[in-house]
Every structure is written in C-alpha cells, then in structure tokens.
Image (cartoon, rainbow, N blue to C red):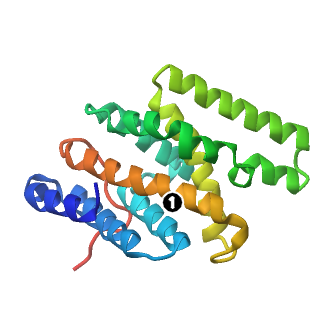
Amino acid sequence: MHYKFLKEQHRKVRDDHTKSLTIRIHRALSWLNKAEQSSDLDSKFIFHWIAFNAAYAQHIDRSILMGERGLFQQFLSKLVVLDTDKQLSRFIWQEYTNTIRVVLNNEFIFESYWDAQNGLISEAQWKENRTNSIRASHHALANEQTDKVLSIIFNRLYTLRNQLLHGGATWDSKVNRQQINDCSSILSQIVPILISIMMSHPNELWGEPIYPVIT
C-alpha cells in the first residue's frame, strides 16, 4: 500500500469518520506522501516517523501522561488487536529473517549500547541486554505475539529517531547508512498498514489530536 491508494480509500470513507479520526488520517497521509516523495533516506525516515506520530499522538490529562514510548506501544497493541486481516503479523513473519533481524542486531540503534559508551553500564551489560532483547523477540514471534515483536522493533526505531531529531547524527552520514536504510524500509511498510487499520475501524476511540484544527 502506498499514499495514492490510501488517499483514495480515505476519500471514500471519511464522511463516515469522526472529525478527530479524519484529522489524524489526513495529517498522517500528508506526511506519508512527503516521505514517499523524498529522495534521501534520512528525510524518508523522519517523514515516516512524523506520519506515525500524526496517527497516534493525542491529548491526554497531564496527570496521567505516559512517556512517548508507552503511548506508541499502547497504540501498536491496540492496532494488533484490531488487525483481523493479520497484515502486521504477515509483515513480521515475512521480514523477520531479513530487515528486522538486521535491525535487532544493529548495536548503533540499541539504547544500551550508548549507555555503555557514556559510561552508564558495562560493555558486558549492554551485550547481555541485546541478547535478552533478541531472545524475547524470538519467543514473541514463536508465540505469535505480534505486539511484543513490534514493541521491540519500535524501541530500536525510536533510538534512531532520537539520534536524528536531537542532532545526534549527521545528515547523509556514511557511518549510519545501514540502520537508516533498514529502519526506513520497515517504517515505509508498517505506517501504511497502521493507517489502513485505523480507517477500517472508525468507531474505535482514537482520541483527540493534541493540536486541533482552528479555522
């Protein structure tokens, strides 16, 4: 699925959607379109992440504010439950031995590796943490726990997201091409699926956008 297909689908069903869902999908699709038009991998990853953010971010009471990882992991778990066509499960099974395996093994997008580089934990500890993370992903895959596999994958993507958006990487750097390429590939396939699932479940509570449209 790509932007043009999803945009056509949205035009057909948006009149039956709540205003908040329509805004979410419209915004997410606009950034998906920009991501698909981008010619460099750094931009593709960033714009795909913004599309993902547009889909899940919502206004909630600050007294119960969750961390960003908690919010998007909750969002992913909800979508796995709603994904009756098993699109996400199929994607995980098809890509696990290829791009996903490479991403999970890449130390440069594993947060514990950077904790070790900054002297917060030992080298032995970050390696053990990565081994445990990969083992957990294998176990989740074997038990068809798609939400857990996605959570582990998105923790890696989130580390790369932080590196880019917080100025911890150089644009078009030769040293991070592998992870940029692999993570961009994963997001480019998952984000359209997430948008499609949301459009197929207009009666679910998706929450109000943090920044509503003011006219």
Q: Residue at x 34, y 31 (%)?
A: 81
User: Quarter-wise, where is residue 133 in the image?
Assistant: top right
The kind of secondary structure element at disc 1 is: helix
The residue type indicated by label 1 comes to Ser
Give the residue at x 62% y 69%: 164
As drawn, the residue found furthest toward the bottom would be: 215
Percent x, y of residue 210: 38, 63
Question: Residue at label 1?
Answer: 184
Question: Is residue 56 at all visible to an observer of this figure?
Answer: no
Q: Nearer the viewer, residue 185 or 131?
A: 185
Q: Residue furthest front?
A: 98
Q: How many marks?
A: 1
> Is 137 displayed left or right of 106 in the figure?
left
Where residue 48 appears, x then y in whole percent? 44, 63
> Residue 138 location in percent, x, y?
59, 27
Q: Residues within 10 Å of mark 1 (few under 14, many from 20)?
A: many
